[in-house]
Amino acid sequence: MKLTPSVLELDLSEIEKRIRRFIKKYVENSGADGIVLGLSGGIDSSTTAALSSLSIGGDQVLGLMLPEKETYNPKDIDDAKLVAEKFGLKTQICDITPVLENFYKTIPIFDQADKLCKGNIKARTRMIYIYYYANKLNRIVCGSSDKSETMMGYFTKWGDVAADISPIMDLYKTQARKLAAHLGLPAELAAKPSTPALWPNQLAETELGIKYETLDLILYGLERFMTTEEIALQLNIENTLVKKVKNRWLSAEHKRRMLLTAKLEYRTIGTDFRLPQNAY
Amino acid sequence: MKEKIKLAFAQISSKRENKKENLQKIEECIIKAKEQAADLVIFPELSLTGYVVRDQIYELAETIPGSATKKIEGIARKTGMHVIFGMPELSEKTKATIFNTAVFIGPKGFIGKYRKMYLPTHSVFEEKRYFRPGYQTVAFNTALGNIGLCICYDLFFPEVCRLTRLKGAQLIVSISASPSVRRSFFEILTAARALENTAFLAYVNLVGVEEGLQFWGGSRLVSPTGDVLAKAKYDEEDFVTCEVDYNDIRPTETFIPTLRDLRPELFDELKKYSELL
């Protein structure tokens, strides 16, 4: 197999149709009155918002904008509003700063300098807001994680990835960008650098230490059981970089799976309790 | 035996775990097929229960005969129709093992059944976890001609269709629950199995979304020369009728004599080398 950018090309019309059917069917079967999602103004949430609106109608989709003062960027709010307007979804802005500050104040061991632990509070607080709206409005939560970030474990456990469905999780970042353009999202937005907005000026590619164009090809190769040596050779990069990506992918499995328990009984949750989901 | 028969493809989505609702839909389709003067109506794999039912299969499986087959026998008798559908079959003998089975029922009652031989257990599929494989290919001599049965993944293994053909099948029916990512494989294989056996092949696939899987439909009748004679819509429920003219088989076998040229000794080789993989 040749690892060139063409392997990531998709029939975007077909992909759009499949995702829209998936969302529509899930919402129908769940008996929910619609969808709530976090709308950050980034590429993934904008794409997911657009797909949700196209699937069930914008009236049934609520995009929550959840800014906080440290990472506040008016451009993100503008972009989110632009997407909402274009695809006809409803929006609500909730400033989560006061809640965050109370968290910081009331945690005895809180460490202001620990950006990651602090940032994770932000992601989990956003999740609480989103789920509150979902509960209150009898809706489901639609996640917007992509495959690149999910494979890399580049998300907050029980935070930004917490959702009932995650319609673009089988698309790598570069594929999600192409889908965004296909759906008619502005080119500028589709090319916008990704950020989890956990601290100021945080950029996904800088933190991951690799461009998505390369990362996605490495992950594509790993998905298809290629060796790290083969991937490195084909992409003309250091094997140490490919190995680093592979190790990060494997070590983050705990963030992607149902929590493990000790096998003690006849059928066990998360292992051999295999039940259908969303059938009723 | 009729030289020409009319088939109806009931390309349905099943309500998972809801046999009552699915039987209702099956009944409606049989009546519709009758109204459209079809002789045989074909439903997808596991159409009685839906495909992604996981551990619930233990509750859903039924013996044959059992309440589902009796119900369909009653409808077939009343309408004078032949029906092929898929269900999880609980072994009458052991009351413990389950098979992924295609059931063939006619106006006079139960004709026969086929237990899926090749159970996909890879990628998103986990059939071997639940089902015991079948051990016999089948071809039934009926008022509608000699009809062989297979199920979905069996199409990847030419020997299943080949054996039904060697047992006399002129029409091979493949019921299926194939998800979208595999559409291109089945579009090739259905044509190949018909062509290499110079037989008609009726492929009836499920539609609908079951968890993350989307079944692509695209049910079709393939001629002995590999041409698609009739095709249902992709991804949506559909109901298509089409005609099988058995007279087309003989001139095809003259033009592409795959049965005349069959080399039995290669099958011994095949056995030997497949054991040495």
Image: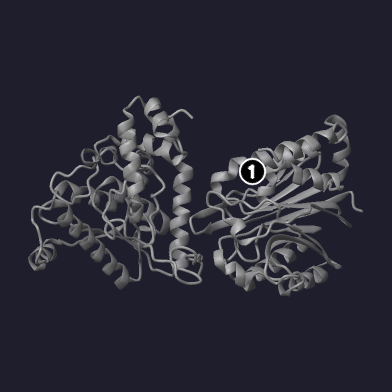
Q: Is residue B228 above or below residue A260?
A: above
Q: Is residue A41 above or below residue A272?
A: above
Left or right of B62: which side holds A149?
Answer: left
Query: Is the image coloured rainbow, by chain, by secondary structure, or in one colour?
Result: one colour
Q: Position of residue A226 (x, y in %)?
A: 45, 35
The image shows a total of numbered marks equal to 1
Instruction: Work out whether residue A173 can be spotted.
Output: no
Q: Is residue B76 above or below residue B10?
A: below
Left or right of B109: which side holds B273?
Answer: left
Q: Residue furthest right?
A: B1
Instruction: Work out whether residue A43 can be spotted.
Output: yes
Nearer-the-camera pick, B197 or A45: B197
Residue appearing at x 39%, y 49% in the figure: A168
User: Secondary structure under badge 1?
Assistant: helix
Q: Which residue is labeled 1 in the image?
A: B186
Q: Position of residue A256 (x, y in %)?
A: 36, 55
Residue type at tag 1: Phe
Nearer-the-camera pick, A94 or A174: A174
Residue appearing at x 75%, y 38% in the figure: B272
Q: Position of residue A187 (x, y in %)?
A: 29, 37
Q: Position of residue A66 (x, y in %)?
A: 20, 58
Left or right of B202: which side holds A249?
Answer: left
